Amino acid sequence: MDFLTKFSLKNAFAVFIISFLLILGGLYSFTRLKVDLLPNIEFPQLSVEVIYPGASPQDINEQVTEKLETKFKGIDGLKKLQSSSFESISIINLEFPFDTELDDAEQQVNSFIKEAGLPENVQTNVNRFSFGTFPIFNISLFAKGDQDLEKLVNEEIIPELNKIQGINSVSVGGMTEDILQITVDQEKAAQLALSLNEIKETINSKKFSFPAGNLNENEIQIPVRVQEKIEEINELENLVIQSEFAPTAPPVKLGDIASIEVVTEKPEITRYNEKESLSMAITKKQDANTVEVADKVLTVINSYDDRLEYAIGFDSAEEIEKSVNTLVKEGLLGALFASIAVLIFLRNFRATIIAIVSIPLSLLISSIFLNQLDISLNIMTLGGMAVAVGRVVDDSIVVIENIFRRVRKANKDMTDDLIQDSTKEILKAITSSTITTVVVFLPLGLVGGITGEFFLPFALTIVFSLLASLIVAVTIVPILAKFSFKKVPKEEKVGAMQRAYASSIKWSLNHKALVIFLSIALLAGSGFLVKGLGFTFIPNEEQKLLVATFQLPSSTSLEKTNEVSLKVENMFAEQQKINDVTVGIGSRDFQTGLKRQNQANYFISLGDGVSVSEFIPELEKEMEEIVLSIEPDAKIGIQEQSTGGPPSNNNVNIDLYSTDLAVLQDAAARVEEYMMKQEDLKYVSNNFSEKQKQVVVEIDPEKSAQLGISGFQILGTITDKTKPVDAGIMKLGSEERRVAITYDEKSETIEDLKNTVIFTQQGPVPITEIANITETEAFTSIQKLDARYSPEFLHKLIPMILEPYRMPLSRVSKMTLNCLMVCPLKAEAAVMRQLKHSLSWELRWSWPSDLSI
C-alpha cells in the first residue's frame, strides 16, 4: 500500500477532490438510509392460513390440516412443520433453513395447496414473517360533529394511505356492517315446506347476467346480454317462492312469510380511554423506512383534522427515533471524548485535528456501502459505528506520531520522502492491526441462522469503517501532515505520567513470572464470572407501553366480554400511572390471525418516571381481582411491548408429543395436575383442557336412504335452525349489502334441535327418527408438530425457580421442550432441568412409552 502514500503526496489536489466527493456521497447516503430499530430480517418461515367457515376444530383438522400436512412433508428442505386447528381456521407454520430460497418454497406450497383436494369454499393465504410484519401504528379515530367517520375512512383515508410507498396493509377495527336481514316466520315456512336454503337459491336465481350471442346491424356486431336482477326491497318482497318438497303447496311471496330490513352489526368493539372509536392498525412493507412511512401516514391523517380527531395508542416509529437519536448522541459523545483523549496524549491541536479527521471520513465512506447494500440505520449499524469511533483513529495516530518521531530524529524540515518513509515504516504494523480487527468482527456476520443475519449489519459497518480508516491513514493523513507542519514541534520533557509508566514497565520486566501468573489468574477468574451471566439474544429496553389481555372461556359472547372489559377499563382509568388505554374486544390477534369474541386486548401507555417492572405485578393483581371474580377460569397476561425483536417475558411453553391422541390426552392431564400442585408455577393452562360443549347429530344411513334424504340436506336444515344463511351480496339502489336469511326463532337448546322436522318427498319427518342427537365436549383447538399431536402447556414462573441460577425473571422467554425457540439459554436449561427431573420422578411409573418431551 506504499504506492497510495506516494501517489497522494504527488497528487494532493486530486486526493482532496476525491475526499470531498466521498464526503458528499457519504452525507447523501447517510440521509438515504432507512431508519429502523432492528435489522429487517425475513425469517425462513411460511405461514399458511386456511379459513373454512363454520367447521369445527376436528373438521378443520381432518378435512384441511391433515391433507396439507401430508403434502407439505414433501417440500424440499422443510425443517419443521407446526399446525393449529381452530374453529373455522387452520394455521400451518413451515420453517426452513436460512439459506432457503423462500420464493421457490412459497411456489411449492401454493402448488401443494391446489393439489390437496380441500373443500370448495375454503380461503387460503400464504404469508411470510419478518420484523417488518408487525404494525407500526395503532391509531384511534374519532368523528368531529356529525361526520360519518366510517364512510370517511373507507372512501377517502384508506385509499390515500394505500398510495403511500411502503404501506403494506391498513386494517380498521370497530367498523359496523349494514346487513340486509330477511327474518322468516318459521311457522309459516314450515306449513309451506320451505327451507332457508330454498329461499336463498330463489333469490340468487334472480341475480344473473350472461352473454347471448350477437346481432348484426349494418355490418356492426352488437352483443346481446340476458340479465335479471332485483334492485329494490319491494321487488324482493314480491319475489314468489315455491317449495321443491311440496309441489302442491301454493306459491307465496317472500314478503308474506318474512320481514326484510337493514340491520347494523358490529363484530368487534374498539375504544380509547373508555370512548368509542375506530382503531386503525398499519403495517409497512419489509423494505420500507419505518420512520418515513410513519411521517407520511400522519401527514395524510392530519389533512383531515377538520373532520376527525385521532389519538396514537402505539407508535413504533417514535420509539425507533428515540433509540436511534440516543445512539447517535452516544456516538457523537464517543467521538468527542476520543478527540479529547487524542489531544491530551498528542498535546498538539493541529496533530489532533489530523488524527480525528479519520472518524467522520471513515463513517461516511461506510455509509456509502451500507446504502448500496440496502442496510438500514438501526441499533446494530449505529452500534457498529459507535464501536468503530474508538478504533478508526488508531491508524492515523500511529502514522502522525511516527512522522513526528522521524522528523525529530532526522533533525531537518518535513519532506515528501521523509513522510513517505515514515508511513512505510509502520505500514505493515497498522495494516496487520486493522486486518486482525476485521477478521475478529467479520465472522459475526457469517455465523449461520438468525444470529448471523442479525449481526451482519453490525459486522459490515465495523469492517467498512476500519478499512476506510486504513486508507485515510496512508493517504489523507500524510498530506495533512505535510501542509500543516513546516516544522515539527520539539518533543516535550518527560512528565510524571511517562515516568510512572516507565517504572511500571521496569517492575514488570523484573517480575515476569508474577505478571504472567496474575494474567492467567485474571483470565481464569473472568471465565468463572461468565458462567454466572445470563444469555439472551437481544435484551428489550424498558418500554413505557404495556400489552395486556384477558381471555374468557371459548363460548363467551362478545357482549359478555365487553361487560368485563368495561370494568377493567374503569380500573385503568383510576390508575394515576397510566396515561391512556387502547382496547380491542373481539379484534384480530396479530400473532395468530384469529378473531376471538372471548378476548380483550389492551395497549397501555405509562407516564414518565413509572417503574415498569414494579408496576406490572400491581396492575396484574388489579386485573385478577376484577376478571377472576367474574370468571374464575379466565386467563390473564400482561407484559412490556416488545421493541420489535424476539419477545422477552416470563412465559414458558412445554410441548408433549404423541401420534396417539388418547394417550397424549391422558398424559397431558397428569402433567397438568402435577404442575398445578407446584407453588412456584402460576397460570398453568393446557390446551387439551380447553373444551366446549358440542352437539353431535349422528345420521342413521339406512333410515335416511329409505326416505331419500342426503346428509347435506340434514346439514342444511340444522344450519337453518342455528345460524343465519349467507345469501351473498346484493346491490339495492346505490349500495351493496350482504344478505342474511334467518328464522324469527332460533334453536337455543338441544330439545329445540330434537324438534326439527326434515322435509322429504314422502312428507315431513322428525329428525329424531333418522338421527341420534347427543351432547359431547370437544377441544377448541388441535396442535400438532410434524404431524404429531401436541398439547401445549403455558405457565408463568416466579423468581424462586430461577434464583439458584441467578437469572432475573425478566430474562425468561418463551420456550418449548423438544422444539427450542430463540430464548435465554441459561434460563432455558434451568427450567428444563427443573421440570424434566420433577416430572420423571413423579410420573415415571406410568409414563406412556410412545410419549416424548
Image (tube, rainbow, N blue to C red):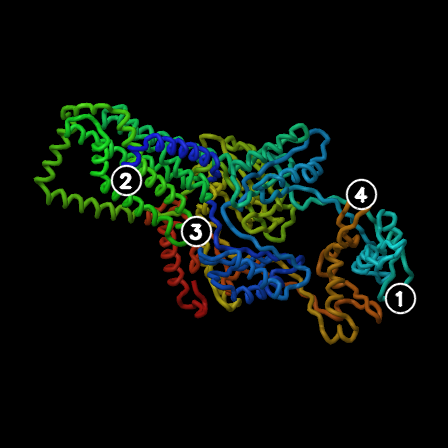
Q: Marks 2 and 1, Cα distance to the nearest angstrom?
A: 103 Å
- Indicate the quadrant where residue 504 lies: top left
Of callouts 1 and 3, which one flags the residue occurring earlier in the amino acid sequence?
1
Mark seen at residue 681:
3
Q: Nearer the viewer, mark 2 or mark 1?
A: 2
Would you say the residues marked 2 and 3 are in contact, meaning their CB atoms lie under 8 Å apart?
Answer: no
- Indicate the quadrant where residue 369 lies: top left
Would you say the residues marked 4 and 1 are in contact, meaning their CB atoms lie under 8 Å apart?
Answer: no
Identify the residue at image location x=51%, y=38%. 316
Residue at image mark 4: 734
Of callouts 2 and 3, which one flags the residue occurring earlier in the amino acid sequence?
2
Q: Marks 1 and 3, Cα distance to the nearest angstrom?
A: 67 Å
Q: Nearer the viewer, mark 1 or mark 3?
A: 1
Q: Nearer the viewer, mark 2 or mark 3?
A: 2
Check the image and report above or below for 731 versus 377: below
- The three-letter amino acid code for the residue at tag 1 is Pro
Residue at image mark 1: 247
Is 192 left or right of 459, judged from the image as shown?
right
Check the image and report above or below for 720 versus 520: below
- The three-letter amino acid code for the residue at tag 2 is Phe
Total numbered labels = 4
Q: Marks 4 and 1, Cα distance to the nearest angstrom?
A: 37 Å
For disc 3, the neighbor class at 10 Å (few under 14, some 14 to 19, many from 20) is some
Residue at image mark 2: 3
